[in-house]
Image (cartoon, helix red, strand yellow):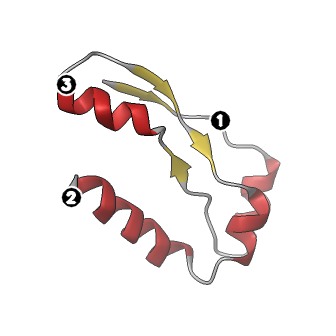
């Protein structure tokens, strides 16, 4: 199972100046494929620039997302 990462652009550089990062969104059907053992290639998507900019702390949110993905 492979997740293709999107390329970063100038918006990511702006967020880095503020100490933030955009989280990577993985489609739900990827998780279903993991359970069934199907070989899947998925194109990941970054969250919205505006959501990332106005989030409280990107590290806390990224840790929550990682915990959620590993618990499934």
Q: In terms of image quadrants, where is residue 63? A: bottom left
Q: Residue at (32%, 37%) from the top-left corner?
A: 31
Q: Which mark is residue 71?
A: 2
Q: Position of residue 30 (x, y in %)?
A: 38, 32
Q: In terms of image quadrants, where is residue 20? A: bottom right
Q: Which mark is residue 22?
A: none
Could you tell me which secondary element the residue under label 3 belongs to?
helix
| Residue reaching furthest to the bottom | 56
Of badges 2 and 1, nearer the viewer stands 2
Q: Position of residue 27 (x, y in %)?
A: 48, 38
- Compared to 50, does 57 lie above or below? below
Q: Residue at (37%, 25%) from the top-left corner?
A: 2
- Compared to 64, does 22 lie above or below? above
Could you tell me which secondary element the residue under label 1 belongs to?
loop
Tell me the residue that label 1 is attached to.
7
Q: Is residue 42 left or right of residue 55?
A: left
C-alpha gap between disc 3 and disc 2: 17 Å
Tell me the residue that label 3 is attached to.
36
Which quadrant is home to the N terminus? top left
């Amino acid at each position: 199972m492979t997740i293709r990462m999107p390329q970063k652009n100038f918006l990511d550089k702006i967020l880095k100046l503020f100490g933030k990062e955009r989280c990577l969104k993985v489609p739900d059907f990827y998780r279903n494929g993991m359970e069934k053992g199907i070989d899947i290639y998925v194109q990941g998507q970054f969250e919205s620039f505006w959501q990332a900019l106005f989030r409280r702390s990107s590290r806390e949110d990224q840790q929550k997302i990682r915990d959620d993905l590993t618990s499934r």
